[in-house]
Amino acid sequence: MMEKVFVEMINTHRGIIFKVCNLYGASQEDKNDLFQEIVLQLWKAFPSFRSESKQSTWMYRVALNTAITIFRKESKRPERMSLSGEEFQIPDMSTFSDSDEQISMLNRAILGLTEIERAIILLYLEEKNYEEISEIIGISKSNVGVRINRIKIKLEKIIKSDRYELR
C-alpha cells in the first residue's frame, strides 16, 4: 500500500524532481544520477511524511536538500576531463529568438548564484509564495523576501556584466 501511494506521488509531482535536476545537474548523466538519488531520499523519508504540508512542498524540500548536499560534495572534488572539439563549437546565435536569448542569459546568471540562492529563485520562478518558500527552504518568511530582493539585484549585476563582456 505504501509503495503505491509513493509511486503515485512521484508520478504526480515528478516535474519538481526534473526541475531540481536541471538546475543542479551539469550533464545528462549528472541529472540522471541526481534524479535517482532524490527518489531514493524521498523513499527513505516517506515513512516520516506526516502530511503537515503539501506533498509538493515536502518533495521540493527533500529534492533541494539532496541536490545541495550532492552539489557541495562534488564541488569540493576537482574534476578532470579532456576537452574535445565539441566544447568549442559556438552556436549560431541568429537562430535564437530574443526570448530564447533572454532565458539563456537568465539561466547562465542563475548558475552564478549560490546553491541556496538557486533554490530560492527556482521556487520564486515557480510562483511559490513566501510562506511556501519559507517552509521548503527552512528560513523565515521575512528572510525570504529579503533574500529574493538581494538575488534579483545579484542577477541583474551578473547579467549586466555578461552583456558588458560580450561587447
Image (tube, rainbow, N blue to C red):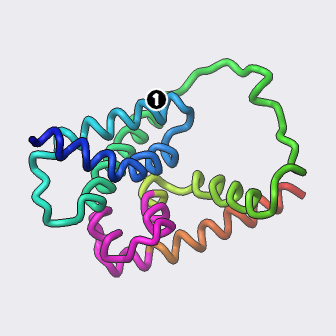
Residue 78, position as x, y percentages in the image: 52, 27
Please tell me which residue is depicted at 14% across the width and 66% down the height of the picture: 52
Counting from the top left corner in percent of width and height, residue 9 is at 26, 50
Picture mark count: 1
Residue 56 sits above or below residue 65 on the image: below
Q: In this view, does 23 lie to the left or right of 53?
A: right
Camera-side residue of 80 and 99: 99
Mark 1, secondary structure of its residue: loop
Q: In this view, does 2 lie to the left or right of 42?
A: left
Q: In this view, does 131 lie to the left or right of 24?
A: left
Quarter assignment of residue 90: top right
Q: Name the main secondary structure of what is drawn in magenta.
A: helix
Image quarter where the C terminus lies is bottom right
Asked whether residue 70 is drawn in magenta, I would say no
Instruction: Name the residue beneath numbered marker 1.
Output: 77
As displayed, is residue 108 above or below residue 164?
above
Magenta-highlighted residues: 119-146
Q: Which residue is drawn at 74% across and 57% down?
A: 100
Q: Which amino acid does label 1 sit on?
A: Arg
Q: In which quarter of the view is residue 129 placed?
A: bottom left
Mark 1, residues whose alpha carbon is within 10 Å: few (<14), some, or many (≥20)? few
Is residue 147 shown above or below 118? below
Residue 142 at x, y = what percent? 34, 81
Please tell me which residue is depicted at 58% across the width and 21% down the height of the picture. 80
> Which of the image's four quarters has the N terminus?
top left
